[in-house]
Amino acid sequence: MQTREIFRKTWAEFFQDFTSDHAGNLVNLEIKGWQPGQQQVDTEARSLPLRDISADLKDNENSVMIAVGEDANVLLRHEIEKVSHVRLIQSDSGIDTGLQIVSSNGQTATLELTAK
């Protein structure tokens, strides 16, 4: 496995391309760490289709929204605020296997691609 840092100035385009390449792929989503106004968080989604990942960079918000689910009626959305790092995880042969999104407050979202 190898990890590649995605620089902030390219987040919007990167997430657009990543979503285009992997929309519909089944994913696992794990959230660990602190979330503002809450205690420790450990949210998981298992084997749900990836719908969308987007970044909001205006006014230095640095937030990332992940949406997974079967359809509009069964949709899980999770927003990571104050993102400090976005990392693409790839196999040794260069195939995308997931993402790690880290917030400045220590919250980490790990998205694992499983199958299409």
Image: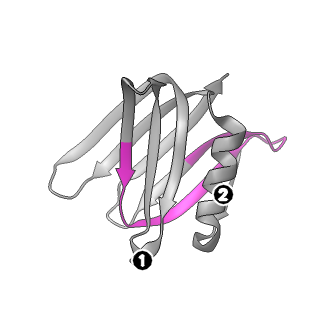
Q: Quadrant of residue 81?
A: bottom left
Q: Position of residue 89 (x, y in %)?
A: 66, 47
Q: CA distance from mark 2 to mark 1?
A: 17 Å
Q: Nearer the viewer, residue 38 or 16?
A: 16
Residue visible at 66% across and 61% down in the picture = 13
Q: Amino acid at mark 2?
A: Phe
Please identify the dominant SS of the magenta region: strand
Which residue is farthest bottom? 59
Residue visible at 52% across and 53% down in the picture = 54
Q: Is residue 65 above or below residue 43?
A: below
**Label disc, if present, on residue 14 of the rendered structure:** 2
Q: Which quadrant of the figure contains the C terminus?
A: top right
Q: Position of residue 36 (x, y in %)?
A: 21, 58
**Label disc, if present, on residue 60 of the rendered structure:** 1
Q: Which quadrant of the figure contains the N terminus?
A: top right
Mark 2 vs mark 1: which is more N-terminal? 2
State left or right for residue 24 relative to residue 85. Answer: right
Label 2 sits on a secondary structure element that is helix
Q: Which residues are magenta?
A: 78-99
Q: Position of residue 73 (x, y in %)?
A: 36, 23
